[in-house]
């Protein structure tokens, strides 16, 4: 059983490493503008605002805010579905396409730097340990 001294020391060490900040950029791309860009970039059929909400598991209100920001930045265009005017179809602009391609290159570059500095084996070990820790500290599904 871990002692209080061990626990406090480990908490101090983890705090100094800022583990939450390590992959914040990647997390931001999972439910923000980056996630919408990725979804649109990889889509093989027209994507609606409702589909974005469903696929990213975020509220329609959140999607509306993201789309408004993206439209203002020139990343997307929005148009009404010709069959159902209540439905908004979202398309990438050329600028949006170039933006997601650039974001992906940045992610690959950062990961390359990490692999070069730490080594693939140590990085994979870190990832496996992180998964184990997450499983240990995650609340059960029936918690709330």
Image: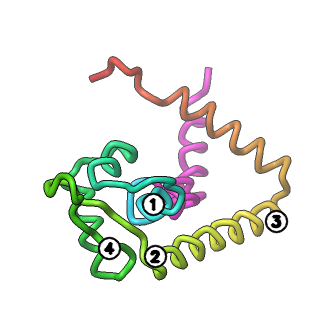
Q: Is residue 61 left or right of residue 105?
A: left
Is residue 112 shown in magenta?
no
How many numbered marks, from 0 up? Answer: 4
Q: Which mark is residue 40?
A: 1
Q: Which of disc 4 and disc 1 is earlier in sequence?
A: 1
Compared to residue 88, the image places residue 94 above or below, namely below
Which residue carries the number 4 mark? 77
Q: Position of residue 59 (x, y in %)?
A: 24, 48
Q: Residue furthest front?
A: 83
Question: Whole-Å distance between the Cαs marked 1 and 4?
Answer: 11 Å
Q: Which mark is residue 96?
A: 2
Question: Whole-Å distance between the Cαs marked 4 and 2?
Answer: 10 Å
Q: Residues within 10 Å of mark 3 (few under 14, many from 20)?
A: few
Kindly state the secondary structure of the residue where label 4 is placed.
Answer: strand
Q: Position of residue 72 (x, y in %)?
A: 28, 81
Quadrant where the image shows the N terminus: top right
| Eye-nearest disc, 3 or 1 | 1
40 and 139: which one is in front?
40
Q: Residues within 10 Å of mark 2 (few under 14, many from 20)?
A: many
Question: Whole-Å distance between the Cαs marked 2 and 1?
Answer: 9 Å
**Magenta segment boundaries in residue numbering:** 1-30
Q: Which of disc 1 and disc 2 is earlier in sequence?
A: 1
Question: Whole-Å distance between the Cαs marked 3 and 4?
Answer: 41 Å
Which residue is found at the position 77% from the left and 44% from the top? 124
Q: Position of residue 47 (x, y in %)?
A: 37, 55
Which residue carries the number 3 mark? 117
Q: Which of disc 3 and disc 2 is earlier in sequence?
A: 2
């Amino acid at each position: 059983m871990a002692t209080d001294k061990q626990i406090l020391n480990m908490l101090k060490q983890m705090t100094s490493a800022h583990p939450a900040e390590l992959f914040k950029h990647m997390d931001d791309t999972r439910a923000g503008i980056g996630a919408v860009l990725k979804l649109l970039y990889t889509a093989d059929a027209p994507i609606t605002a409702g589909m974005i909400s469903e696929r990213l598991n975020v509220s329609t209100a959140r999607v509306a805010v993201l789309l408004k920001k993206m439209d203002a930045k020139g990343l997307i265009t929005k148009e009404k579905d010709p069959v159902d005017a209540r439905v908004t179809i979202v398309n990438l602009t050329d600028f949006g396409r170039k933006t997601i391609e650039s974001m992906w290159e940045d992610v690959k570059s950062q990961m390359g730097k990490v692999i070069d500095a730490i080594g693939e084996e140590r990085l994979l070990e870190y990832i496996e340990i992180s998964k184990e820790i997450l499983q240990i500290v995650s609340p059960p599904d029936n918690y709330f």
